[in-house]
Image (cartoon, rainbow, N blue to C red):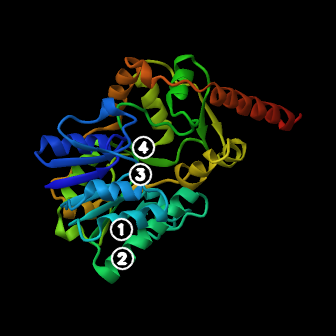
Amino acid sequence: MKVLLIGGTGTISTEISKKLLRDGHELWLVNRGNRNHELPEGARILTVDINDEEKVSALLADQTFDVAADFIAFVPAQLERDYRLFRGRVGQFIYISSASAYQKPLSDYRIDEGTPLSNPYWAYSRNKIAGEEFLMKKYREEGFPVTIVRPSHTYCERSIPVGVEGRKGSYQVLKRMLEGKPVLIHGDGSSLWTLTHSRDFAKGFVGLMGNIHAIGEAVQITGDETLTWNQIHQIVAHALGVRLNPYYVSSAFLAAAAAPGLGDGLLGDKTHSVVFDNTKLKRLVPDFTATVRFDQGAREAAAYIMSHPECQVEDPEFDAWCDRVIAAQEEALEKARWQQ
């Protein structure tokens, strides 16, 4: 198949690009070229900002594609642009939405594609919902061949998932673990979460490409392994070869104290227990199986990060904030402690 990806070097899309090339597909990437060292060999690169619609249209000229997918569309206006660019020139358009779009709070912790879409906490999720609605309207009214894919928390070897992190990613949390410092965990760490390795995600995604039964459908792609946040952090600490020193703070307190924008993803996503029912994906892609357990993926990622200095991005501002949160809760606890 002739495939065009908008992005192609992100956490999710990098493994998809690799798999497409291994499988012998003709791969085109629309990419700004900011991470040229990560562009896969064998792909045809269109170095352009996708937001420059006129230039992208000129570069595409009269090209047509079996599949086009956008990994970096976050607001409806970007989907409207994609619709203009690919209308009439693509056999299937895949939009990467988000499982965070599902109803919060959930009426049932088990999630499938029929779970309502509603997230009053996080504008990111509401924008994803609006993007889905725009594309499905075009499908119903004009037959625009859209497939919506909803990932949950997908990770790769360049970053280990944690519950509470700063703007620069999870490495500062790993550094706190390595230094024996307390690590913030939202709530009491018992809520359920699902992590999916990007290699597993790529298998499901490629299986949906060119699949006539996926047109006009929304499909979630996640693993089947469910863990508590306590288990996740214990696994990460074990992968680093250190003892975890957890420190529990309510999600509401963390969200209220966090830098602007960081608390929304906590209240609108990670606070809630999620267990995904992937029956629909496995019906559409019968050979899909997620094979990377989190303990395996965490060991791989820890080894990669600790051997690649470019992945060790420190965040002293976040580190200081963690210390302030802990000090504030300890002070409040001392003041509130029952006096005999």
Whether residue 311 is situated above or below residue 207 in the rendered picture: above
What kind of element bears circle 2?
helix
Task: Residue 156: give x, y in percent of width and height.
Answer: 35, 36
Tell me how far mark 1 sits from mark 2, CA to CA. 9 Å
In front: mark 1 or mark 2? 1
Tell me how far mark 3 sits from mark 4, CA to CA. 28 Å
The residue indicated by pointer 1 is 83
**Mark 3 or mark 4, earlier in chain:** 3
Q: Return the mark for residue 138.
A: 2
Q: Nearer the viewer, residue 227 or 7?
A: 7
Question: How busy is the neighbourhood of tag 3: few (under 14 within 10 Å), some, or many (20 plus)?
Answer: some
Circle 3/circle 4 CB separation < 8 Å: no
**Mark 2 or mark 4, earlier in chain:** 2
Tell me how far mark 3 sits from mark 2, CA to CA. 20 Å
The residue indicated by pointer 4 is 227
Task: Residue 64: give x, y in percent of width and height.
Answer: 19, 62
Q: Residue furthest right?
A: 340
Question: How busy is the neighbourhood of tag 4: few (under 14 within 10 Å), some, or many (20 plus)?
Answer: some
**Mark 3 or mark 2, earlier in chain:** 3
Circle 1/circle 2 CB separation < 8 Å: yes
Tell me how far mark 1 sits from mark 3, CA to CA. 14 Å
In front: mark 2 or mark 4? 2
